[in-house]
Image (spheres, rainbow, N blue to C red):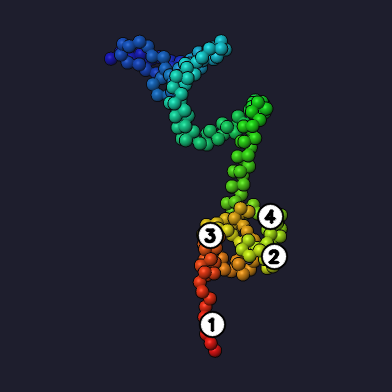
Amino acid sequence: MKTRTYTCQGCGEVCEQSGRGAPRRFCPEKKCQQKADAARSKKYNDRLRSEGKETPAQRWRKNNPERARENDRHKRATNPELYREINRRKASSVTGRANRKAWKEANPEKAKEISRQGAARYRARSTQNEVFYVTRKDLDRLARTPCVGCGSTENLELDHIIPVARGGRHSIGNLQSLCRSCNASKNARLNIEWRSRAQQQAARPPRQVRAA
Ligand SMILES: [Zn+2]
Ligand SMILES: [Zn+2]
């Protein structure tokens, strides 16, 4: 069989080709053909963009929005590291910063909402290591609040509305002020259980005191 040689137009390697087919232009192993195709389509796309025209990929995305989003999701899910890096670079670039600033000015309400969400996420993260958001001020305010059980202002203690033993958190929304005796009777109960128990006890006839 007749063997010819040809030079790969990508890497310049001299390769052999057998048979009578049209002469090959790229080597069989290395990805020279793919690279050349990519370079050609990049040139084509760049020209379309410079003329303000839609590229084939942009047209496909417009016609298949669902699949385009699905592809994006898949790419992001399979290369989280890569996309974190890309986003980081975009955000810190000069144009990224300028775009963000312009967007914020154009969408003040949305920007505010996003920063609120960010702050909430930050707070949620900071509650993971048992470092909760109960400030000195919160504690002082609770210490000045009378017992929610009996109204006493003596021997006040901090109580967890949903007991920590039952999954309640040491956060400001779950704290109330109770006097020592109310706290002892509430124990690990929820407020509602504690109150209904107190009502049952009040309804019960007083215990007979045994005569000495
Ligand atoms: Zn090659
Ligand atoms: Zn009390």
Q: Nearer the viewer, mark 3 or mark 4?
A: 3
Expressed as whole percent of the image width and height from the top left, the position of residue 182 reads 60, 67
Give the label, 3 or 1, closer to the camera: 1
**Where residue 92 appears, x then y in whole percent?**
64, 31
Q: What numbered label is drawn on residue 200?
A: none
Q: Element under label 3?
A: helix
**Mark nearer the N terminus (1 vs 2):** 2
Q: Which mark is residue 153?
A: 2
Measure how far apart labels 3 and 1 are at the Cα level. 30 Å
- Disc 4 versus disc 2: distance between alpha carbons? 17 Å
Q: Residue 192, labelled with which disc?
A: 3
- The percent coordinates of residue 50 (x first, y second) are 57, 12
The crowding category of the residue bearing disc 2, from other C-alpha atoms within 10 Å (few below 14, some 14 to 19, many at least 20), is: some
Residue at 47%, 32% in the rendered image: 73
Indicate which disc residue 138 carries.
4
Identity, as a three-letter code, of the amino acid under mark 3: Ile
Q: Which residue is mark 1?
A: 209
Residues tagged 2 and 3 counted as in contact (Cβ below 8 A): no
Alpha-carbon span between mark 1 and mark 4:
45 Å
Q: Quadrant of residue 163?
A: bottom right
Q: Residue at x 63, y 54 (%)?
A: 172
Label 2 SS: loop
Q: Look at label 2 and name its amino acid.
A: Thr
Most foreground residue, 30 or 70? 70
Q: Residues within 10 Å of mark 3 (few under 14, many from 20)?
A: few
3D distance between C-alphas at marks 2 and 3: 22 Å
In this picture, residue 72 sits left or right of residue 99: left
| Quadrant in which the N terminus is drawn | top left
